[in-house]
Amino acid sequence: MMKKKRDAPKRAATAKAWAGRFQERTDQLVEAFTVSVAIDQRLYVHDIQGSIAHCKTLEKARVFSSRETKTIVRGLESVKAELDRGRFTFTPQDEDIHMAIERRLTELIGPLGGKLHTGRSRNDQVALDVRLYLRDHLDRLMEQCTELQRVLLAKAKANSTIVMPGYTHLQRAQPVLFAHHLLAYLEMIERDKGRVRDARTRLNVMPLGSGALAGTNYPVDRAYTAKLLGFSVVTANSMDAVSDRDFMIEVVSALSILMMHLSRLSEELIIWASQEFNFVDLPDAFCTGSSMMPQKKNPDIPELVRGKTGRVYGHLMNLLVMLKALPLTYNRDLQEDKPALFDALDTTTSSLQVMTELMRRLNVNREALSDALEHSGFLATELADYLVERGVPFREAHGITGRIVRAALEKNRELTDFTLDELRAFSNRIETGVLARLTVSSAIDHKRQIGGTARARVDQRIKELDRLLG
């Protein structure tokens, strides 16, 4: 845990890096209100990474000597080691992680530490740090998405023969393979990965060298800095570079859609795990009980994921509203971008992790799913299509089938209980083969088109996904 020195406010106020122009010490209320180091200290690795690249660029521009560069780089590596080990001591003068690192660097190597900020503003420094941070974390997020896909695929393969009711409006509609249902979420996550990948591509632009807003007076080679930091291109406009937060909005938008998909899966698990459905059994380790009712097994994890989805949506709206009226270029409002971004990323990451493990250990109740297929009303579409195949216009076939369904309801019978003669009383286009068509197996296997629920199609897609996901 990082330590915090309890220096007197008066001492801290006299040490601000920008204090030269001011006659009054910063009010203690302002100190407390503006400090951000508790939030942005997670950027320290990327801040030091950017500072080392900046230092080497200044050496290339002959602003620093080789000896100065080596001293500064060694000092920065020492600061990073302290932060890595939790031995870094923060002081009240540390407004943010950037100033904390610079302050400690100066303590370690002397006045030379004050040269590091040459040709750089916190404006382009922060813009760089967040891009570096997001690059790393989005790579890990995509790996997590892939792991959830692998778990869904494994669960689909293990239950590839199970049939379940498919639903529209939460009403039984048509039979589908349980694996087909699970693979729908795998397809959603694949799109999520695409959005995250696209966002990462667009944020991979190097802003350092933009200064506070107008650029820098020093002959820095920005392409060289970009190469050191692994950026493909540099920003083309210094004013845009320091004020741009589009990449944050795009990332949180992608996270919001990902959370929406996790929430939809959570909602289905909550329904399926209820006693009314009993399609699945959630692992005990991912549920809680009731403090009053001993029999309860509550689906807390999917409920929390469903609830946390709104939290991520709120962060997206927070960023959009914060930026909607900001004039160019930098405004202190932008300090509030990081709490929204970081919490959205943390929330999505933890939700992905917990849902992946829950799905890995999910138990499927095959008997309950089989029992749910006993009521054959959802084979009505098969009968309508059967009539169409025999030359009946679909609207007419729909009406004939609807009348048969109504008769079944009035007589408290299933569609499959009707004899051939009884069915022919509704249409002479109904022939002997109709009874073979009105089965769950037939209904499944007739959906042979690409994307359908036929066993052959689902098996083929499972093989494709096996190759895709490795």
Image: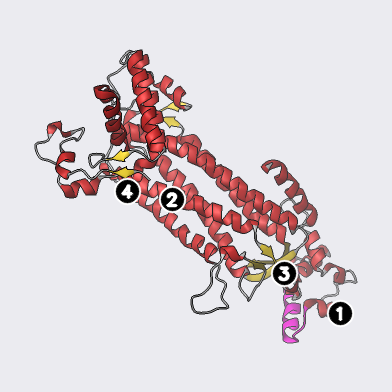
Tell whether 372 sits left or right of 213.
Answer: right
Q: Answer above or below: position of 281 versus 361.
A: below
Q: Nearer the viewer, mark 3 or mark 1?
A: 3
Q: Residue furthest left?
A: 23
Mark 1 or mark 4, which is nearer the start of the sequence?
4
Pointer 4: what residue? Answer: 322
Identify the secondary structure beneath mark 3: helix
Image quadrant holding the N terminus, namely top left
C-alpha distance separating marks 2 and 4: 16 Å
Q: Can residue 307 be seen from the camera position used here?
A: yes
Residue 123 position by quadrant: top left
Residue 409 position by quadrant: bottom right
Mark 3: amino acid: Leu
Identify the secondary structure beneath mark 2: helix
The residue shown at (14%, 42%) is: 10
Overall secondary structure of the magenta section: helix
The residue shown at (61%, 50%) is: 148
Tell whether 44 sits left or right of 392.
Answer: left
Q: Nearer the viewer, mark 4 or mark 3?
A: 3
Foreground of the two, 281 or 247:
281
Mark 4: amino acid: Met
Identify the secondary structure beneath mark 4: helix
Tell whether 51 sits left or right of 450.
Answer: left
Task: Specify the label residue 419 is tagged with.
Answer: 1
Task: Specify the label residue 369 is tagged with.
Answer: 3
Pointer 2: what residue? Answer: 344
C-alpha distance separating marks 3 and 2: 36 Å
The residue shown at (34%, 22%) is: 72
Mark 2: amino acid: Ala
